[in-house]
């Protein structure tokens, strides 16, 4: 039976990396029934529609799974980020970003194997903001709830168990943010007691950032509140070769949206040079979510081979191939594995 998946190409480089990823997914031989929605974000607003149109939400509510390209968010004004809205409407409370060294890709370290688990709905991204025009004072509320914190902490420990990970580090700033970070840390310590098989410790966020850029091999799973987790995710991406190669997933109890860590990259949009590896790796996370392990392995191994051989890579990682050329080579390798 075909997998029904909502496909949201997004804007900027989104449609390019999405088409490339669909080419590779279809090379696995698995049947997909794509429910494609192109109109989202600015495109929707220009047509007088909400940035997150109701038909997009209804589609994900019905399929349970979406593969999503990046969507541009206006800075400082305009509509609320489509990503933030999707996460909040669908209760996609966990953002998972695996950051593992890709052999062959020239980076500062050759032994990074981190997973950043970010709380995806609360904290400073709760959307509770206020601006006092007269006093010229702006406030953003960082809301941390017991229910939301327990949910993300349990998710992280369960993820660690399922993926044979040994350690969970909680990143916080409880020395200063005694209420919000303090609650997150207190609940982290409580939940850790239910997982005696997993080592638990905590780090203050600034010190952790310094340690990560010096000794990333010392860390395993890292869990944090929304803003710290967002920043750590990009730091993790930088450790393994950049935004073009780092995958991500937004996961809730009923739905999951798989998307790359990167944004819409307006500086290279429309040039057929964007690296689709990040979205392809997000797609393999989606395949595993759909219990299609063999197909996920075929794509992951094909990607690893190309990086090891330095074949047909895109310019951001030192190659000269276009997005479409890279996709065709990956699809050929995946098809070869199928027929082997
Ligand atoms: P960005 O990730 O779009 O780009 C940062 C830099 O990385 C740029 O130089 C870009 O060319 C490069 N880059 C990113 N992805 C690449 C890829 N696949 N291949 C090669 N190079 C790549 O970040 P930004 O410029 O801060 O954000 C642009 C827009 O994207 C903003 O509107 C932002 O809100 C939005 N955004 C969306 C998402 C999402 O939809 N999930 C995530 C992050 C940012």
Image: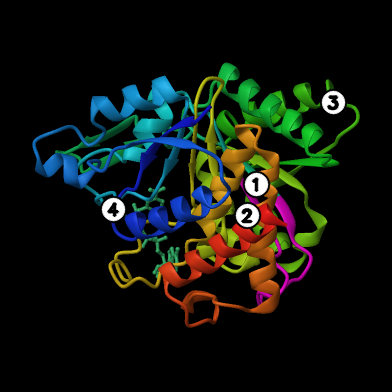
Q: How is the image coloured?
A: rainbow
Q: How crowded is mark 2: few (under 14 residues within 10 Å), some or many (20 or more)?
A: many
Distance between the Cα atoms at labels 1 and 4? Answer: 26 Å
- Nearer to us in this view, 43 or 200: 43
Could you tell which of marks 4 and 3 lies nearer the N-terminus?
A: 4
Write the residue at 23% across / 30% down. Answer: 53
Q: Do the residues labelled 2 and 4 touch (CB within 8 Å)?
A: no
Write the residue at 67% across / 55% down. Answer: 339
Q: Nearer the viewer, mark 2 or mark 4?
A: 2
Q: Are marks 2 and 3 in contact (CB under 8 Å)?
A: no
Residue 296 disc label: 1
328 up-or-down from 119: above or below: below
Q: How crowded is mark 3: few (under 14 residues within 10 Å), some or many (20 or more)?
A: some
Task: Give the farthest residue toward the front.
Answer: 339
Q: Which of marks 2 and 3 is in front?
A: 2
| Whole-percent x, y for residue 195 in the image | 84, 25
What secondary structure do most residues of the magenta stretch adopt? Answer: loop
| Whole-percent x, y for residue 55 in the image | 26, 26
Distance between the Cα atoms at labels 3 and 1? Answer: 29 Å
Where does label 2 land, which residue?
Answer: 299
Residue 11 disc label: 4
Distance between the Cα atoms at labels 4 and 3? Answer: 42 Å
């Amino acid at each position: 039976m075909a997998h029904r998946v909502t496909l949201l190409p997004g804007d900027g480089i989104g449609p390019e990396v999405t088409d490339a990823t669909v080419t590779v997914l279809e090379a696995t031989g698995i049947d997909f029934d794509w429910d494609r929605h192109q109109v989202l974000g600015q495109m929707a607003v220009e047509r007088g529609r909400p940035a997150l149109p109701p038909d997009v939400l209804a589609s994900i509510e019905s399929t349970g799974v979406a593969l999503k390209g990046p969507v541009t968010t206006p800075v400082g004004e305009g509509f609320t980020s489509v990503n933030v809205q999707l996460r909040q409407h669908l209760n996609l409370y966990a953002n998972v970003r695996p950051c593992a060294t890709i052999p062959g890709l020239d980076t500062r370290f050759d032994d990074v194997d981190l997973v950043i688990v970010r709380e995806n709905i609360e904290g400073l991204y709760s959307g509770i903001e206020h601006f006092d025009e007269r006093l010229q004072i702006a406030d953003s509320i960082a809301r941390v709830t017991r229910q939301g914190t327990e949910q993300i902490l349990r998710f992280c420990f369960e993820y660690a168990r399922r993926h044979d990970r040994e350690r969970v580090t909680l990143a916080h700033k409880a020395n200063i943010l005694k209420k919000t970070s303090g609650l997150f840390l207190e609940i982290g310590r409580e939940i850790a007691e239910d997982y005696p098989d997993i080592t638990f410790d905590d780090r203050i966020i600034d010190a952790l950032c310094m340690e990560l850029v010096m000794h990333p091999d010392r860390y395993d799973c890292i869990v944090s509140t929304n803003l710290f987790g967002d920043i750590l995710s990009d730091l993790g991406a930088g450790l393994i070769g950049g935004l073009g190669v780092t995958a991500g997933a937004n996961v809730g109890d009923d739905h999951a949206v798989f998307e790359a860590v990167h944004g819409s990259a307006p500086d290279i949009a429309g040039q057929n040079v964007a690296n689709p590896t990040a979205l392809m790796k997000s797609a393999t996370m989606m395949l595993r979510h759909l219990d299609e392990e063999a197909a996920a392995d075929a794509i992951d191994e094909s990607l690893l081979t190309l990086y090891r051989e330095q074949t047909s890579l895109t310019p951001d990682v030192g190659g000269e191939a276009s997005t479409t050329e890279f996709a065709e080579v990956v699809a050929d390798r995946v098809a070869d594995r199928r027929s082997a």
